[in-house]
Image: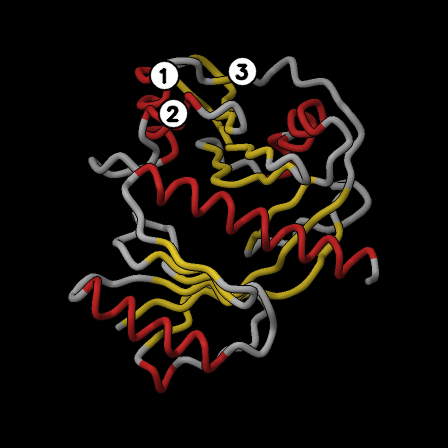
Amino acid sequence: MTDTSRLLHIAVEDNIAWCSRVCSAHGSNETRSSRAWANLAISPPFYPNIITREKGVQNEVVELAHKVREANQPQKWGIKDSFGDLTLSEEGFERVLAGHWYGGTVSSGGSADWKTVTSPAELLLWERAWGSSDDTIFPSTLLEDHRITFWFKGELGAIESGFISFDTGFSLGLSNWFSLKGHSFAQMGVLKAAGSASQGLPIVCWSTDDLSGDEMGLAKLGPLQVWISQ
């Protein structure tokens, strides 16, 4: 297995672990095989019900989709096509975005500008700054999980930017970054904070923006797509 394919596998598994953790905080009904993960209950907004773990799993995804539909009608829900090789238009899905997985080992950097959420009240302020609706996507119970850190810049009453890190023990996954000043991933200095927390673990994430380049420290690993039921 090449370094790129190994990192791609790590990135996909990290994302499944993170999505599973968030879904479980809402009450999930999960099933998984070597080929795909699925939540047969209603996933929170922006979180999928199916994530593929291998290439070439079209038939299994179609079967899982029927099960999710039976459990979730008439909710709209999503499929994360981790390798960008599914064709789901004829199954009643619309491709809503395409992006790439990224990964790499980042040297420890300074993170003096970054702070971390420590209480339910702070988490609520973080989520509102991120842009959540009235529904709470990130319950305060997630703060009890030592693997999860909610990062932010600015003051609690005026958060400027933020992101989430999730430590699986094999990788540090990054997600949900935002900047109210319109700064990019690089401009925010997300990797400086992540590097200080990664302890040498690979850092992985996915994005519709191009995060590759020497200045970023992350390599492009492979394509992904997200499909939404119609």
Q: CA distance from mark 2 to mark 3?
A: 11 Å
Q: Are marks 1 and 3 in contact (CB under 8 Å)?
A: no
* Mark 2 or mark 3, earlier in chain: 3
* Mark 1 or mark 3, earlier in chain: 3
Q: Could you tell me the amino acid type at mark 1?
A: Glu
User: Which class describes the residues within 10 Å of circle 1: few (<14), some (14-19), or many (20+)?
Assistant: some
Q: Are marks 2 and 1 in contact (CB under 8 Å)?
A: yes
Find numbered disc 3 in the image and state the secondary structure of the residue it sits on. strand
Find numbered disc 1 in the image and state the secondary structure of the residue it sits on. helix
Q: Could you tell me the amino acid type at mark 3?
A: Lys
Instruction: Indicate the quadrant where residue 228 lies.
Output: bottom left
What x and y, as percent, mark residue 17?
A: 51, 46
Query: Which of the image's four quarters has the C terminus?
Result: bottom left
What x and y, as percent, mark residue 181?
A: 48, 31
Q: Could you tell me the amino acid type at mark 2?
A: Trp
Q: Nearer the viewer, residue 152 or 74?
A: 74
Q: Which mark is residue 126?
A: 2
The residue singled out by tag 1 in the image is 122
User: Which class describes the residues within 10 Å of circle 2: few (<14), some (14-19), or many (20+)?
Assistant: many
Instruction: Indicate the quadrant where residue 137 lies.
Output: top left
